Image (cartoon, rainbow, N blue to C red):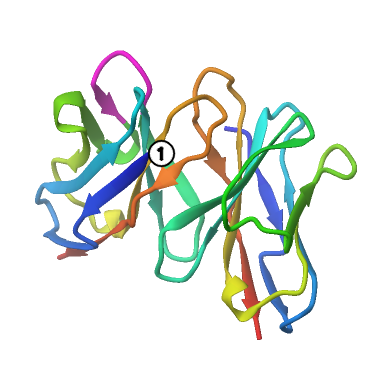
Amino acid sequence: EPEVTQTPSHQVTQMGQEVILRCVPISNHLYFYWYRQILGQKVEFLVSFYNNEISEKSEIFDDQFSVERPDGSNFTLKIRSTKLEDSAMYFCARTMSSSYNEQFFGPGTRLTVL
Amino acid sequence: AQSVTQLGSHVSVSEGALVLLRCNYSSSVPPYLFWYVQYPNQGLQLLLKYTTGATLVKGINGFEAEFKKSETSFHLTKPSAHMSDAAEYFCAVGITAGNKLTFGGGTRVLVKP
């Protein structure tokens, strides 16, 4: 299956700083998603992105978060003014098919907020 | 809204024994169902999926799952556990193409020699 890469693999930041997490999917992917997994907890949906627009977002995805695809390839998640509780693994996912909901996940970025 | 419940946060099996991981879902419309596996410090890997058609689906690494609508279940099984099956397993549900996935809490599998 086509791969999704995520950078960086690990990001350490100070509370209150802004971070940008990047996902590099292959261009013919249809939907893109961000999920997060706080240590020891379930995987939680943040936002989905289709045709350069947000198609769905969760209650977690508040004004602190934003997504964009600035250059038509990279798909980014920006977290403004990070909080301690933002520490988690952040996964990018994508789907290629419009028929099913099969999502393929990237390896994740581990964000540590100090 | 859809939801997923995985019974048992931890399961311990002996090598060669049956692996059974339970998943029950709630959905107001016919669901798409998935099992993902997560090895330590890695991302989520798709094991298998149910969309339509045959209710018994086979996946990678010898795993299979059966969709039972009457029981709203999608339990994952493997006849004979291998040490390499030690990982965390997540059941997930989606309802339409492009829709988010809702995950269960995960079941961590320990395989004893």
Q: Does residue B72 lie above or below A112 as drawn?
A: above
Q: Does residue B50 lie above or below B112 as drawn?
A: above
Residue lying at 51% horizontally and 54% vertically, measured from the top left: B43
| Residue located beneath label 1 in the image | B1
Name the chain letter of the residue that bears numbered label 1. Answer: B
- Residue A65 lies, in percent from the top left, at 72, 59
Element class at badge 1: loop
Residue B27 magenta-highlighted: no
In the rendered image, the quadrant that contains the C terminus of chain B is bottom left
Q: Quadrant of residue B51?
A: top left
Determine if residue A76 is in view: no
Q: Quadrant of residue B48?
A: top left
In the rendered image, the quadrant that contains the N terminus of chain B is top left
- Of residues A10 and A20, the one nearer the viewer is A20
Q: Amino acid at mark 1?
A: Ala
- Residue A48 lies, in percent from the top left, at 64, 40
Residue lying at 53% horizontally and 24% vertically, measured from the top left: B97
Where are the magenta residues, as a range?
B50-58
- Of residues A75 and A26, the one nearer the viewer is A75
Residue at the outermost right position: A71
Residue B53 magenta-highlighted: yes
- Residue B7 lies, in percent from the top left, at 19, 54
Q: Does residue A62 lie above or below A106 as drawn?
A: below
Determine if residue A30 is in view: yes
Residue lying at 76% horizontally and 80% vertically, measured from the top left: A16
Q: Residues within 10 Å of mark 1 (few under 14, many from 20)?
A: few
